[in-house]
Image (cartoon, grey):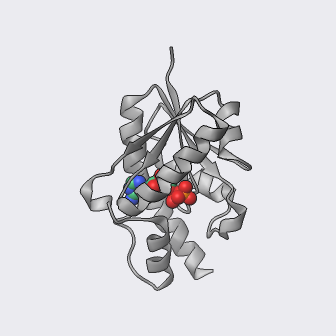
Amino acid sequence: MIKKVIYPGTFDPLTNGHLDIIQRSAAMFDHVVVGIAASPSKNTMFTLDERVALAGQATQHLSNVSVQGFSGLLIDFVKQEKVDILIRGLRTTIDFEYEFGLTNMYRRFAPKLESIFLTPTEEYMFLSSSIVREVAIHGGEISEFVPPAVAKAIAQKVKS
Ligand code: ADP
């Protein structure tokens, strides 16, 4: 039986922390779908299409990883993909509180859905898309925190 999992998020944009979790998942499961939420309420820096393209470029080297955008509820996307395992990244206890709440909510709608939490390598423990965006907007160097294609795309966004 092929074990397919979904790693969902907004990925605005994908960072090396996300990539770390994707690589760990890809080593554990047959197929990993990076599910990129439209998240219209989040007022994202990158459009859904841009976020999908950037994540696709960053994961090109991983043959069992695919990237898909979705709008609407994650639970519906999970059902559509016929997946019963979600991957989430855990950094600090702040993530834990938030993720714990989400997991309980998901269970109400999809009782068989399990969430697996993975932690990144120590150097990415405090890395987030929002910090990367903030640093870039103020002219800081972000190339050590994101894949090269993302660094280039942010530089272009900030310029425009
Ligand atoms: P969301 O909008 O769902 O919080 P994000 O795109 O910010 O989406 O993050 C997607 C997932 O990746 C979440 O589970 C989040 O906790 C995790 N994550 C974000 N940054 C990191 C990181 N540096 N290391 C590990 N996991 C991370």
Where is residue 28 drawn, in percent x and y? 37, 30
User: Can residue 15 be seen at all in this image of the molecule?
Assistant: no
Q: Residue furthest top?
A: 1
Where is residue 40 drawn, in percent x and y? 72, 63
In this rendering, is residue 71 above or below 83? below
Residue 96 position by quadrant: bottom left
Between 57 and 14, the one lying in front of the other is 14
Seen at 60% across and 43% down, the residue is: 106
Where is residue 19 drawn, in percent x and y? 41, 50
In this rendering, is residue 141 above or below 97? below
In this rendering, is residue 4 above or below 143? above
Between 122 and 52, the one lying in front of the other is 122
Which corner quadrant holds the C terminus? bottom right
Between 47 and 74, the one lying in front of the other is 74
Seen at 54% across and 66% down, the residue is: 153
Is 146 placed left or right of 8 in the picture? left
Is 79 placed left or right of 137 in the picture? right
Seen at 42% across and 50% down, the residue is: 89
User: Can residue 157 be seen at all in this image of the molecule?
Assistant: yes
Is 22 placed left or right of 54 in the picture? left
Seen at 39% across and 52% down, the residue is: 90
Between 26 and 73, the one lying in front of the other is 73
Q: Residue furthest bottom?
A: 138
Where is residue 8 drawn, in percent x and y? 56, 47
Residue 42 position by quadrant: bottom right
